[in-house]
Image (cartoon, grey):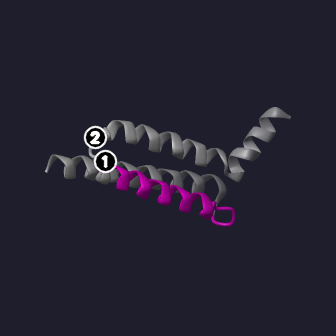
Amino acid sequence: MKKTLKTLVLAIFVVLGTATFGFAEYAVSGVSEFPYFQLGCLIVGGMTIISLKQKYPRFYAGELMGVFTMYTILVALCTAPVFNAIKNFVS
């Protein structure tokens, strides 16, 4: 029961992180430039992390939450709005 609860908490965290990414990108870029590929990569990465938690119960849920947070930041850095913001900031 404890293993299932921790996996469920991790799954909720992944869903909320993905939803936050989607909302932030939609608010910044709109529908015309929405990064669907990055959203798909984030979903697949989240499912991979959840399956690792199910397969290897010795992973701590907090560690995997940190891994997913860093992965979300990495994916967000590779989107067009962030590239444009960095380009405007440098020039």
In reply to whether residue 44 is colored magenta, the answer given is: yes
Q: Secondary structure at mark 1?
A: loop
Q: Which secondary structure is most common in the magenta stretch?
A: helix
Q: Residue furthest bottom?
A: 32
Name the residue rendered at 55%, 51% in the picture.
24
Q: Is residue 32 placed above or below 6 in the rendered structure?
A: below
Residue 85 placement: quadrant: top right
Residue 17: image location, x then y, percent: 44, 49
Q: Which mark is residue 58?
A: 2
Q: Would residue 55 appear left or right of 26 to someone viewing this image?
A: left
Which residue is identified by label 1?
56
Per the rendered image, the range of residues in magenta is 31-53
Compared with 35, 65 (above or below) is: above
Question: Residue lying farthest right?
Answer: 91
Which dot marks residue 44?
none
Please name the residue shown 86% across and 35% down the image. Answer: 91
Coordinates of residue 69 in the picture (x, y in percent):
47, 41
Viewer-proximal residue, 15 or 57?
57
Q: Residue at x 29, y 53 (%)?
A: 54
